Structure formats: C-alpha cells, structure tokens
Image (cartoon, rainbow, N blue to C red):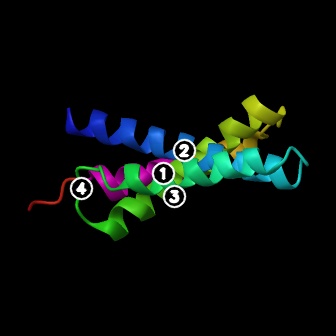
Amino acid sequence: MQIARSAALFCLAALLEIGGAWLVWQGVRGHRGWAWAGAGALALGLYGFVATLQPEGDFARVLAAYGGVFVAGSLVWGAVADGYRPDRWDIAGALVCLAGMALIMYAPRGR
C-alpha cells in the first residue's frame, strides 16, 4: 500500500511540475499571456508541497527518484499535449529512468 501511495504522489507531482512548466512556457513563449504563466507558477508551487507528502523522509532520495518520473512524464506530456512522438531511444531512456527510480525508492534496505 505504501508503494502505491508513493507512486500516486510521484504521478501527481509530475502532473503539477510538468503541467506548471508547460503553462509558463505557453504563457511566455506561446504568447498566451500572464494568466497562463501565473497558473503555471501556482502549479509549480503545489508540486513542491506534494513532494513533501512522500512516505520516505529523505529529501535527497525522494527528489533523486522523482527525476526518473519527471523524465518519463515529460515525454508522455509532450505526446499528449503537443503531439510529440517519442522514438524508441526516448522510450528506452524513460524506462531506464523509471527503473532507477524504483531502485532508489523501493529497494529493500534492511533498516
């Protein structure tokens, strides 16, 4: 159950961070205005809060592992929101990152 909660929090964090960055990008680079950028800044702030809800208490471990989720999530976001088509190397790299995340977060540690 703890792994499922942790994985759900990682997905929520990715949605907020990647979505927030995308909104800022659209607001500034896409010329959609400051409301978009402001909404993105709010989402990015919420991401920082959600990261603190992880059951694991070590900041370094949580943020290092989250990096793998961020990489994979960014490719998924790009495919859904912008029509980006990841190639086999993008997908392979994302899978390696997710495997690294799983090792960092969920490997047995005999504590």
**Crowd rating for badge 2 (residues with CA inside 10 Å; few <14, some 14–19, many 20+):** many
Pick the front one: 35 or 16: 35
Res. 53 visible in picture: yes
Measured Cα–Cα span from mark 3 to mark 2: 14 Å
Q: Residue at 43%, 64% (x, y): give it.
A: 64
Q: Amino acid at mark 4?
A: Glu
Answer whether labels 4 and 3 touch (C-beta < 8 Å).
no
Measured Cα–Cα span from mark 4 to mark 1: 16 Å
Mark 2 / mark 4, whichever is N-terminal: 2
Mark 2 / mark 1, whichever is N-terminal: 2
Measured Cα–Cα span from mark 3 to mark 1: 13 Å
Answer whether labels 3 and 1 touch (C-beta < 8 Å).
no
| Relative image position of residue 51 (x, y in whole percent) | 38, 54
Q: Amino acid at mark 2?
A: Leu
Q: Residue tagged by mark 1?
A: 47
- In the picture, the disc for residue 67 is 3
Q: Is residue 72 left or right of residue 36?
A: left
| Relative image position of residue 12 (x, y in whole percent) | 46, 39
Q: Which residues are magenta?
A: 96-107
**Crowd rating for badge 1 (residues with CA inside 10 Å; few <14, some 14–19, many 20+):** many
Q: Residue at 86%, 43% (x, y): give it.
A: 32
Res. 96 visible in picture: no
Q: Amino acid at mark 3?
A: Gly
Pick the front one: 45 or 109: 45
**Which quadrant: the C terminus?**
bottom left
Measured Cα–Cα span from mark 2 to mark 4: 20 Å
Mark 4 / mark 1, whichever is N-terminal: 1
Q: Residue tagged by mark 2?
A: 16
Q: Residue tagged by mark 4?
A: 56
Callout in the foreground (4, 1): 1
Does residue 68 sit above or below 36 in this rendering? below
